[in-house]
Image (tube, rainbow, N blue to C red):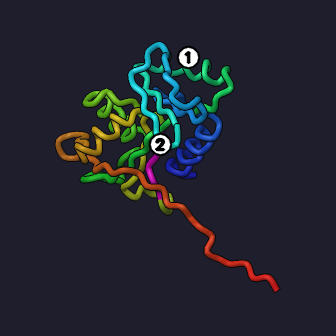
Amino acid sequence: MSEVVKRTKNVKESRTNNVKESRTLLVNNFPENYNPEFSGLKSYYVTKNNLYFLVFNDLNSSTSAFNMIKESNYNVKHAYYKLFFRFQNVDLETIKYDDLKKEITDKLMEIHNISVLYFKFYIRNNKFIGTGDFTIDWKEDMDKLLTDKTLNIDDTRSISLYRFRSRKIFDTTKQINN
């Protein structure tokens, strides 16, 4: 089994077994006009549908608030922000998955102080196809990266960044009743 196939299986298994904590929480059943006050709360945003996005300064504050909200019987989950990327000037035949992943995540931490929660390269026929996605936990960080549009890995290699848009697959077949 190739390194790419092994790595892809490991990523899929870890995603289903290990939900990552984030610095942004989504709460969907706070009372109307609720004023959240939690230690380490940086900011919050309320949508028209009364969804609360709570943004924390650090992971410890977020985790503590998550547990308090959960114990109070409110629906809460970690919020994530996913970006799609395309490689520029990267030799996909010789690069190793873990080496390139480490270079990109280290560069994101070095330049923007962004920690990556999930990271995935896309493959076809057991080969990298030059694209992938990664997940971060602050919307402000996503907006910053999308404004820059490019992350330089080194002097010659870079990745172009795009907002991730998942394709919804709809069943277009119609059931005919006789």
* Magenta segment: 118-123
Q: Is residue 41 left or right of residue 68?
A: left
Between 121 and 99, the residue placed more toward the observer is 121
Q: Whole-percent x and y of residue 56?
A: 43, 22
Figure quadrant of the C terminus: bottom right
Q: Secondary structure at mark 2?
A: loop
Residue 44 locus on image (x, y percent): 42, 28
**Neighbour tally class for label 2: few under 14, some 14-19, many 20 plus, Cα within 10 Å:** few
Magenta: main secondary structure: strand
* Nearer to us in this view, 123 or 46: 46
Where on the picture, by quarter, is residue 177?
Answer: bottom right
In the rendered image, residue 68 lying in the magenta stretch gets the answer no
Residue 23, image x, y percentages: 46, 26
Callout 1 environment at 10 Å: few (<14), some (14 to 19), or many (20+)?
Answer: some
**Which residue: 68% across, 26% down?**
73
Q: Quadrant of residue 43?
A: top left
Q: Which residue is mark 2?
A: 48
Q: For the residue marked with disc 2, what is the amino acid?
A: Lys
In-image side of 169 versus 178 (left or right): left
Residue that extends furthest to the bottom in the rendered view of this protein: 178
Which residue is label 1 attached to?
Answer: 64
Q: Is residue 111 left or right of residue 132?
A: left
Q: Which comes before the other along the chain, label 1 or label 2?
A: 2
Q: Residue placed farthest to the right in the image? A: 178
Residue at image point 36% right, 50% down: 163
